[in-house]
Image (cartoon, rainbow, N blue to C red):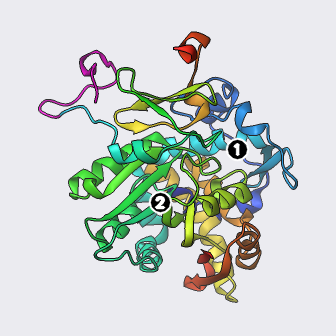
Amino acid sequence: MDFPRFFRSAFAGCGARRFSTAEMRVIAYSPLPNRQGSLPLETRMTRPRPGDDDETDFGFTRVPLQDKQARVDAVFHKVASRYDLMNDLMSAGMHRVWKDLFTAQIRPPRNAPYHHLDVAGGTGDIAFRIAQAGSPRTEVTVLDINGDMLEVGRERAQKRGLAERLTFVEANAEDLPFPDRTFDSYTIAFGIRNVPRIPRALSEAFRVLKRGGRFLCLEFSHVDVPGFDRLYESYSFKAIPLIGQAVTGDADSYRYLVESIRKFPDADLFADMIAEAGFSRVSFTRLSGGIVAIHSGWKL
Amino acid sequence: MQTNDDKEPRQQPEAGSEPTRIDPRLLEILVCPLTKTTLEYDAARQELISRAARLAYPIRDGIPIMLPEEARPLEDEAIAR
C-alpha cells in the first residue's frame, strides 16, 4: 500500500478531522463482517500486551484501537483506483526514485532459490522490482490487508509477465499466515504507518524471517533541513488535500495521510522499535531531506 | 484441484480465461494466522481450514483471505468429519 504515504502531512495542524459520509458508514458498521472493509474483530483485539492501550492514532484523531484498521481500510478502498496517479502527483514522481533505492538493497541470487515477502504491497510496486532483479527461482509473496489493492497488483503482474514469480495473500501484518523462518527478506513500503500495533507487526516480521534474513522498511519520516521543513509543511498540509480533492474528489483521505505521516515516530525512535523486536545491526538512511527514510535490520 | 468452478458465483472469468486458482506454492507454506498451525485445503469449497482455530478461510479468485474476520466458523460436525 503506497498510498497513505503521501498524505500525512497535509492537515496536521487542523485538529480533529471530519469523516466523509462514506467513511462514517464504514465506521458505524464496523462490527459487521465486511469483505470490502476487512474489519477487525474482537478476535484480533483480545490479546492486550504491555504498552498497548485502547486507543491509537488515526492521523491526529485518537480512535479506539479496533477502529483504526477499519478507517485505514476505508481510506484505501476509496483511493485504490487512482493510487498511482496520486502518488506521482503528490511526490512529483519521487516515489519511484525512493522505491528504486529501497529495492536496490535486496539482491536475490541469480541461481539459488530465494523467497521474499512484501507486506502492504498490494499494487506490486515493490514486488515487481524485486522479482525483476531476481531469477526464475526468486519468488515474491505479496501480502496486503486490502483485497482491492491485491487485485490491482495481480493484474499488473500478468501484464508484465511476472505472474510466475509472484504469489498474493490477503492478510494482516500483525498476524502473518506463515511459519517461522520462511523468508529470506521482508519489505514493507509506506505501510507500517497504517498498522495499528506496530510492535506486533515488527515481531511478526522477525518471526517469519530466516536467520540471516533482512528486514527493510520504507516510510515517511521527518524533514530535518532548516527552511525546507516549513516548505514541506505547507505543501503537505495545504497542497496535498487539494490535489486529493481534485483527482479523487476526496480530501479527507489525503488529510489522513498527511496527519498519519506526522504522527509516525522519527527515524531514531523507529530504529529503537525495530531493535526491540529482536533485529540486529539496525540502521537507517534519510532520503530527500528526511521526507522518507529506509530502515534496515537483520535477524542474526 | 478445483472441482466446482462452474458453481462458484464469485468466479466469473472473462471469456477465454480460466478461473484463477490458488498457487500451489502458497498451499505449501500458509498456516493459520491465529494459531500458526497447518491448514487443510478444501478444493470444492475453495477454503483453507484451520481445525485449531475452527475457522475456514475463503479463497476468492485464487487469493487466500487469511483474515479471521473473513473466515467461516466451523460447525462441530465439520470438525468431526
Image coords of residue A104 (percent x, y): 42, 79
Q: Nearer the viewer, residue A241 or A63?
A: A63
| Residue A94: image tag | none
As displayed, is residue A149 above or below residue A125? Answer: above
Q: Nearer the viewer, residue A51 or A63?
A: A51
- Furthest residue toward top: B77
- Furthest residue toward front: B80
**Identity of the amino acid at label 1?**
Lys
As displayed, is residue A74 above or below residue A41? Answer: below
Picture quadrant where residue A164 is located: bottom left
Region rendered in magenta: B1-17
Q: Main secondary structure of the magenta part?
A: loop
Helix, strand, or loop for circle 2? strand
Helix, strand, or loop for circle 1? helix
Q: Name the residue carrying label 2.
A: A117
Q: Residue at x 27, y 21 (%)?
A: B3
